[in-house]
Amino acid sequence: MWQRFFGPMAKIIGIDIDPQCKDCESQGIFVRIGDQADHIFLAEIIDEFGVPDIVLDDGSHQMADITSSFQFFYPLMYKNAIYMVEDLHTAYWEEYGGGSDKSETFINFSKGCIDRLNADHSRGQLDPDLITRETFGISFFDSIVCFEKGDVWWKNAPMIGRES
């Protein structure tokens, strides 16, 4: 499906813990077997294929795994990259580490990123960070969060002129 969407020149890399998923490999589609929360394994993926332009996390649906993968990949991704997590209705389900009152769900992590996105407007209440400097936008949809990296030139522009 994704190769049809992105075209025949796209390089699709799937990560799964189920060895049977390796059977899905074909021209331009690569599957590596490992744990999405294992940063050593993820570094091997980067070494083999390079930094991805798009990450679509449809992995374990475990909140800790989702956050761990994001924290590994997102800082490495280039501007104009997309990081999308789907099936986030599991953020409300206890068996996936979720619950509406649990602060460590990826939904709540993403809500916190909204404040980080706007940190430079907080008059010193929040310190700007990578999310502030390199994230163009964060979009929420039903069970999906999408982070767009971009050239946030207006936040990185030099200050000129004088105080009035």
Image (tube, grey):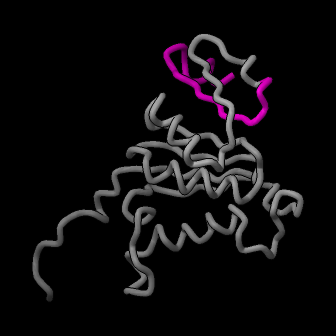
Front-lying residue, 52 or 44: 44
Residue 14, magenta (yes or no)? yes
> What is the quadrant of the C terminus in the image?
bottom left
- When asked about the image quadrant of residue 114, the answer is bottom right
Taking 162 as reference, is 143 left or right? right
- When asked about the image quadrant of residue 94, the answer is bottom right
* Residue furthest to the front: 40
Residue 8, magenta (yes or no)? yes
Q: Is residue 132 above or below residue 87?
A: below
Taking 152 as reference, is 24 left or right? right
Instruction: Give residue 156's position: percent from left, percent from top.
Output: 27, 63
Q: Which residues are magenta?
A: 1-20
Image point (29%, 57%), residue name: 153
Instruction: Give residue 78's position: percent from left, percent from top.
Output: 39, 44
Taking 98 as reference, is 53 left or right? left
Q: Is residue 114 above or below residue 91?
A: below
Front-lying residue, 98 or 89: 98
Image point (22%, 63%), residue name: 157
> What is the quadrant of the N terminus in the image?
top right
Taking 66 as reference, is 28 left or right? left
Image point (69%, 50%), residue name: 144
Image point (39%, 73%), residue name: 128
Instruction: Give residue 134's position: percent from left, percent from top.
Output: 39, 57
